[in-house]
Every structure is written in C-alpha cells, then in structure tokens.
Image: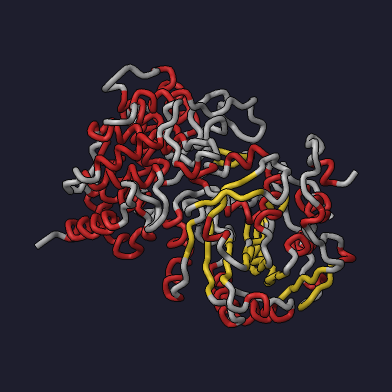
C-alpha cells in the first residue's frame, strides 16, 4: 500500500491531486564542503546556485529565505547559523535577485526580538539592510491547501511569504525526537502564524506533524533549499541535542531529495520517516537511484547520528 | 530637561500614536490590519504614559464591539473564517477592559469573561513522555488544544481582575493555578508548556516566568512562586528584549521589588532595536515604564 494511502487511510478522498504535482525523473542534490562558519559561505552558496541551475530563476525576483530559528543557547547547534543566512543573502543578490527578505515564525519561543538579537542575526540583517519578517505576527491571507493530509481545506499564511516569488528553506540539519529528522520540509512549520494557530503551532500538531509537513510543503511549494550541516545536531533534537560537525552545505531544488540525502548521510532510512516516505510519492524524489549528486560525493560525509527515543526508527 | 526614561517614553509614544489604524486599532507592524493583542497593549501603554488618549477611546471601543461574537469572544474580521479565537489575547482584552471602563461602552465584559472561562485546554491521557498532571485543564492558545503556560496566565489575570466587578468561576481559577504549580520548573520559573520531557528537565524562560508570577501574585509564599521570583531576580537581564524586560518590570513591581535597573535596560533595548517596530512590544514597554 502506498505510504500516502496509509497515512491518509481515514480520508474519503485522495489527499492530493496528482495532476497538480510533477516529480522530476531525476533530482540533483549538491553537497558542498564548508569546514567552518568563518569561510566565505556566500561563495559556497553561489557555487551551488550555479551548479543547480537556479540563477536564472531568481533574476529580478523577490527571494524569501526561511531559516530555522527556534531557541537560543550558547555553544549549541539549534538554529541555522547567521553566517549561512548572510551567505545566502549575498549569493542570491549576486545571482540577480531583486530583493531578498528573511522570515521566521518560531514555534517554540514567541519572543522574536530576543532570538534575532541573541543569535546575532539582527545585527547582520541591519547592516545588510535586509528586511526581516516576523511570520508569527504578519498579516495573513487564507489559501487553499495543496494537499489535505490534515483534512483542513484552507490555511492562513503570512502575506509576506505569499508575495514572494522564490521561497528558500534554510534549515539546520538535526535529529528530531518526534519527526525523526528536521531539515528542509519540517522547517515549514515555521511559516504557520502562531498568533492564529497558537504555539507551538498547536492546531497543526493535533492534526499530526507528518500530515502538517506534507500539507505545508504542498501549499508553499518552496523552490530551493540550503541545509546548514556545517555543524548539525544529533541526539535529543530539535533543541537539546549535541552539536555534530559535518562541514557541509546541502542544496537542491527538490526538498524531498535533499532531505532524503541528508537522512542517508546521518544513517537514517528516509523511507522510515513518514513525511518523507509520502513526500517521495508526489513532492519529490527520495529514491537513491533518482538522485544525482553535485559537488562532493556522499561517501565523504556518511556517518551515523545518535538519536533519542521515542524516534529511533529508521536507522539505515 | 527630560530624563533618559522620559525621552524614551516620548519616542515610543510618538511611534505608537503614528501607527494607529483608521479603524482605531493597531496591527503588529505599521500598515498591518488591526489585531487584538497590539491594540490592547497600545491602549494600556498610552494611558500608562500619561497621554491624553480620550480621542483614541471611542474608535477602539467601537472596534471591540465589532470584534465581539455571540459567545463573547473577540475575533478580528479577517480571522473569522478560521473560527479559532485566540484565548490568550481575549484574556488580555478582558484584563484591559477591567482597567479601562470607558472602553466597555459597547462591548460586554461579562460575556467576554464567560467566553474566556469556558475555553479549556484539553484533558490528556496520563503522559508517557513526561512527568506532569495532564488531567488538569488550564487554557490553551486556541480553544480545545493543549493547555500552555502563557494563555493560562492571561486567563488567570483576566478572571482575577474581573472578580472585582462581578462573580467569576473560582474553580477555573483554582485549576489554572494548580496547572501552573504543576508545570513550574525544578529550578523555579516556567518554560512554555512542560517542565520536563523524555526524562530531561526543561529550563525556564524569563517572559513566561514573569507573566506567571503576575498571575500568581496572590500565592506569594507558595514554594514554587518563591523559587520563581528568585529565578526572575537573578535572570532579569538574561533575555534582552522588550517582551522579557517589560514583563519582568511588571512582575517584579507586583512583588515589591526594585526595577530601576531593568527599566534602564529596556530603554537601552529600545535604542538598539526599536523593538523591531512591533506595536505590541511598544505598548508593553510604555505600560511597564509608565
């Protein structure tokens, strides 16, 4: 039984229309070395944009960068590094983007000012004169969901996100004690406005984390991902895990393919992660045979991440 | 010559008054649609900063009337399709309306308090992932989801304030207080939801601790309240933000503690970030500095 059918077995109708999604025959995932956050990450990311053929797609476009900013604690690996966000701003502007904006709506912490200042992102964005959008409190517009795993018909999403031409997921690669891993697709929990749906985006948690991840990705249809795995997180993620150096930025136009690749790199079978297994049926490619790699070979980075119960399924 | 504080208060007040919408409310950010939370904090802050805001009252009162549903809860027009009133923001509105009788001209405070009272966090089966009493039903951000610390605090503040005007349901207050005691961190203070998860102790945060202390000030002497007050005093500068510093000022003041140093830091934070241009935070800052 296909995973989508299993996940949505209680639904009377198919949770998505196949005609509205096109999975490419093959997807490219770029793995680019980045030994530390002190490197010129703008150069690394620009190389990825060129390799993966997206420079033309962003010319004269409004690019929306969605990092993962959850909580601040010194010497941890909870958030997408400010250095990676700054690098992406430089790279997209160099590629010809008309405007780059950065936005996040933390599902855990409500205090965006504290998170921006303490992570250092506030000073960087001010210096670059880049707009930051507080997705928890932005104006909202109701849109039809691209799929209906949550059985919701519509969802209210931030206007600044919906007005953007090119949406980029910028997660931190982490193990996650409920979802297995958190990377490109899980990152979209952060676009759900907390002022409407509560914290920690409670309505969607009650509809199921996997279901919500699928619906959000099917609706937002992000065009690109840059996964911060320079220093990733293993163990009790997404907040209390341990930093684990990988020295890597992963990029792709196919978020499912990027996440499946990242999962394999850290010793997790992507087919055992429910949202990835289902996403692989309509959002992108998760089968290894359908993913081609640019940049470095995956073998250079393969390892096994420590994980914490209850989510210990899926070890490759 | 105005003091540092007075200059800052004047700047924030001016920024806030510039951001009022034509309908009399405030959005979180300039030019955004009016929302409950920033409107409430703007009205609290402007009055606390001694501004003659009599012209702001009639349109705001009319806005609250337009937002009130049959069940008493407030919902902004563009969110009515969602049919998910934000319980915490409704409790904040009730807390405001108790303090500002002139805003109650067209809105029913009793119905609003009833609506908040009837909203409940869901009762969960006994937890297998953490150590807490999930049978307790406080308040959730959105009705019929999990009870969370902040909405429970705002509901308690609203009910306790309203009790000075008309009878409220004491059992709801008792259950809310029991939930906060149950969720208090071992070190004192409150996290957002749980005090522990998967065998690990979670750490408390400054803004949640401050608002929980405000909600529990009648329980001074209770062990968890005393531990939490110690935590807040020790960590009053730990989270540089208008939300953390503003709520800390309110909480410490409620417990008779000095707040001059926290006020100084709040002023410095305004100079640094202008609170991200967020009207909710400007209103909170004015209210706490006033």
Quarter that holds the N terminus of chain B:
bottom left
Give residue A304's quadrant in the image: bottom right
Q: Confirm whether residue B92 shows in the render.
A: yes
What residue is drawn where x is 78% and y is 63%? A257
* Residue A14 vertical position relative to residue A81 in the rendered view, above or below: above
Q: Nearer the viewer, residue A254 or B216?
A: A254
* Residue A72 vertical position relative to residue B111 in the rendered view, above or below: below
How far across and down, in percent of the image, does residue B27 sit? Answer: 39, 51
How far across and down, in percent of the image, does residue A193 sit? Answer: 53, 49
What residue is drawn where x is 56% and y is 33%? B146
What residue is drawn where x is 25% and y is 52%? B263
Direction from residue A169 to residue A51 in the image, left or right: right
* Residue B12 vertical position relative to residue B119 in the rendered view, above or below: below
How far across and down, in percent of the image, does residue A49 sit? Answer: 68, 77
Direction from residue A140 to residue B13 in the image, left or right: left
Q: Nearer the viewer, residue B33 or A264?
A: B33
Q: Nearer the viewer, residue B249 or B130?
A: B249
């Amino acid at each position: 039984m296909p995973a989508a059918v299993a996940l949505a077995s209680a639904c009377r109708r198919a949770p998505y229309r196949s005609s509205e999604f096109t999975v490419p025959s093959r997807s490219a995932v770029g793995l680019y070395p980045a030994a530390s956050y002190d490197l010129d990450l703008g150069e690394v990311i620009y190389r990825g944009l060129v390799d993966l053929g997206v420079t033309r797609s962003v010319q004269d476009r409004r690019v929306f960068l969605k990092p993962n900013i959850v909580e601040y604690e010194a010497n941890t690996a909870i958030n997408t590094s400010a250095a990676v966000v700054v690098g992406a701003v430089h790279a997209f502007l160099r590629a010809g983007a008309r405007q780059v904006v950065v936005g996040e709506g933390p599902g855990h912490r409500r205090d965006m000012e504290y998170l921006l200042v303490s992570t250092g992102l506030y000073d960087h964005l001010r210096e670059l004169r880049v707009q930051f959008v507080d997705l928890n409190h932005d104006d909202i517009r109701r849109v039809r969901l691209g799929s209906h795993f949550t059985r919701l018909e519509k969802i209210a999403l931030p206007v600044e996100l919906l007005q953007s031409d090119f949406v980029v997921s910028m997660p931190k690669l982490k193990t996650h004690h409920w979802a297995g891993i958190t990377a490109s697709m899980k990152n979209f929990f952060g676009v759900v406005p907390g002022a409407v749906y509560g914290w920690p985006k409670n309505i969607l948690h009650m509809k199921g984390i996997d279901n919500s991840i699928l619906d959000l990705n099917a609706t937002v249809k992000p065009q690109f991902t840059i996964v911060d795995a320079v220093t990733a997180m293993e163990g009790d993620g997404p907040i209390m895990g341990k930093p684990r150096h990988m020295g890597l930025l992963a990029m792709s136009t196919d978020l499912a393919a990027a996440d499946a690749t990242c999962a394999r790199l850290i010793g997790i079978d992507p087919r055992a992660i429910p949202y990835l297994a289902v996403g692989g049926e309509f959002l992108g490619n998760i089968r290894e045979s359908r993913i081609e790699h640019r940049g470095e070979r995956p073998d250079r980075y393969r390892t096994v991440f420590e994980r914490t119960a209850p989510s210990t399924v899926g070890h490759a | 010559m105005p003091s540092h504080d007075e200059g800052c208060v004047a700047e924030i007040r001016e920024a806030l008054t510039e951001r009022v919408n034509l309908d009399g409310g405030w959005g979180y950010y300039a030019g955004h649609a009016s929302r409950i939370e920033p409107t409430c904090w703007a009205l609290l802050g402007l009055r606390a900063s001694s501004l003659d805001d009599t012209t702001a009252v009639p349109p705001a009162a009319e806005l609250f009337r337009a937002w009130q549903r049959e069940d008493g809860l407030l919902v902004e027009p563009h969110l009515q399709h969602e049919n998910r009133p934000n319980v915490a923001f409704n409790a904040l509105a009730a807390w405001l309306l108790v303090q500002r009788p002139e805003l109650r001209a067209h809105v029913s405070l009793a119905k609003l308090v009833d609506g908040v009272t009837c909203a409940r966090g869901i009762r969960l089966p006994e937890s297998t992932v953490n150590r807490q009493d999930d049978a307790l039903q406080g308040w959730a951000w959105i009705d019929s989801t999990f009870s969370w610390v902040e909405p429970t605090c705002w509901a308690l503040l609203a009910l306790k304030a309203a009790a000075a005007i008309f009878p409220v349901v004491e059992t709801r207050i008792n259950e809310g207080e029991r939930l906060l005691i149950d969720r208090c961190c071992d070190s004192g203070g409150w996290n957002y939801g749980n005090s522990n998860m998967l065998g690990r102790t979670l750490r408390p945060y400054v803004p949640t601790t401050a608002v929980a202390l405000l909600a529990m000030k009648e329980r001074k002497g209770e062990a968890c309240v005393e531990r939490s007050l110690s935590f807040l005093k020790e960590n009053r500068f730990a989270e540089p933000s208008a939300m953390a510093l503003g709520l800390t000022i309110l909480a410490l003041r409620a417990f008779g503690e000095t707040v001059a140093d926290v006020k100084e830091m709040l002023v410095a934070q305004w100079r640094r970030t202008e609170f991200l241009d967020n009207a909710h935070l400007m209103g909170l800052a004015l209210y706490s500095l006033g």
